[in-house]
Amino acid sequence: MIRLARVGARKQPYYRVVVIEKDRARNGRSIEVVGTYNPRTNPATVDLKRDRIAYWRSVGAKVSPTLEKLLTRNPAPVTAEPTAEVNPPAAA
């Protein structure tokens, strides 16, 4: 399962996005850390390894409802393919 694990101090929440067995404790030993979530910044900071999340989902990992909301609110950035130079060098 892919879910949030709280690691922040009291009244200062900070979360790791972890891949963990479903029946383990919230902050138990995880298989892999695939991102972080800091709700205290304005706007909230979400840093995800989307390729690793996609891998774990492909092998059957379920995503928690809270993390599903974070994924939909923070879509993956679209990367443009490199194009040919707009202004080629002028011939002398």
Image (tube, rainbow, N blue to C red):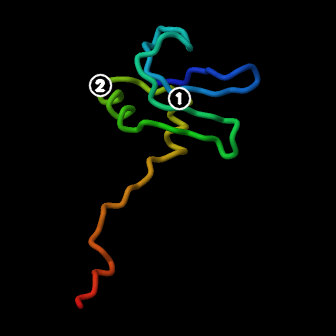
Estimate the spatial distance between the alpha carbons at disc 1 and disc 2, rounded to whole Å.
18 Å
Question: At 36% from the left edge and 60% from the top edge, which residue is drawn?
Answer: 80
> Which kind of residue does numbered mark 2 sit on?
Val
- Given residues 2 and 90, the one toward you in this image is 90
Judging by the rendered image, the residue that carries numbered circle 1 is: 65
Question: Residue 37, relative to residue 83: is it above or below?
Answer: above
In the rendered structure, find residue 82 and report the number of the disc placed on it.
Answer: none
The local secondary structure at tag 2 comes to loop
Question: At 23% from the left edge and 91% from the top edge, which residue is drawn?
Answer: 92
Question: Residue 25, relative to residue 81: is it above or below?
Answer: above
Name, please, the residue furthest toward the bottom: 92
Name, please, the residue furthest toward the right: 11
> Which kind of residue does numbered mark 1 sit on?
Pro
Q: Would residue 1 be found to the left or right of residue 9 on screen?
A: left
Q: Would residue 91 be found to the left or right of residue 3 on screen?
A: left
Question: Residue 33, relative to residue 89: is it above or below?
Answer: above
Q: Earlier in the sequence, mark 1 or mark 2?
A: 2
Q: Would residue 55 be found to the left or right of residue 1 on screen?
A: left
Question: At 42% from the left edge and 13% from the top edge, which residue is drawn?
Answer: 21
Q: Badge 2: few (under 14), some or many (20 or more) residues near its Cα, within 10 Å?
A: few
Q: Report x, y in % for residue 88.
A: 28, 80
The local secondary structure at tag 1 comes to helix
Question: At 49% from the left edge and 8% from the top edge, which residue is drawn?
Answer: 24
Q: Report x, y in % for residue 60.
A: 33, 23
In the rendered structure, find residue 59 and report the number of the disc placed on it.
Answer: 2
Q: Would residue 53 be found to the left or right of residue 11 on screen?
A: left
Q: How many marks?
A: 2
Q: Report x, y in % for residue 42.
A: 70, 45
